[in-house]
Image (tube, helix red, strand yellow):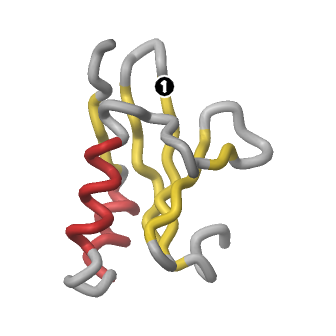
Amino acid sequence: MDSYRIEFTRSATKDLRAIDRQLIPRIILVVEALADDPLPSGCKKLVGSDYTYRIRVGDYRVVYEVHSAKLVVSIIRVRHRRDVYR
């Protein structure tokens, strides 16, 4: 199985800068694991989109799209659960 390439959108990078520094390594580990398995157990497909999923990291959510044809996982948002879907 080929490995997926991880891409961060500008908004996801901005979201990471606003998160507590102690939580960033946990989030990065989960995101890097998406390169080997873009649909791990615990991920949920978001309603209204064919490619958008979310995965939980504590109180934070990582929203991402999987493009299987290009082998790309695009990280869209990384925010606290109360703010991520707004």
Name the spot of residue 84 as percent of width and height, x first. 58, 71
Q: Amino acid at mark 1?
A: His
Decide if residue 85 is on the left or right side of residue 47: left
Residue at image location 46% in from the left, 13% down from the top = 69
Q: Quadrant of residue 4?
A: top left
Decide if residue 53 is on the left or right side of residue 28: right
Q: Quadrant of residue 83?
A: bottom right
Decide if residue 11 is on the left or right side of residue 60: left
Residue at image location 33% in from the left, 51% down from the top = 31
Residue at image location 59% in from the left, 45% down from the top = 53
Name the spot of residue 54 as percent of width and height, x first. 57, 53
The quadrant of the image that shows the C terminus is bottom right
Extreme residue toward the front, this view: 41
* Relative depth, front residue between 61 and 49: 61
Name the spot of residue 39 as percent of width and height, x first. 51, 36
* Residue position for label 1: 67
Extreme residue toward the right, this view: 48
* Relative depth, front residue between 74 and 43: 43
Residue at image location 34% in from the left, 54% down from the top = 30
All told, the count of numbered labels is 1
Q: Quadrant of residue 17?
A: bottom left
The quadrant of the image that shows the N terminus is top left
Label 1: few (<14), some (14–19) or many (≥20) C-alpha neighbours in 10 Å: some
Examine the rendered structure and indicate whether residue 38 appears above or below residue 60. above
Name the spot of residue 23 as percent of width and height, x first. 28, 78
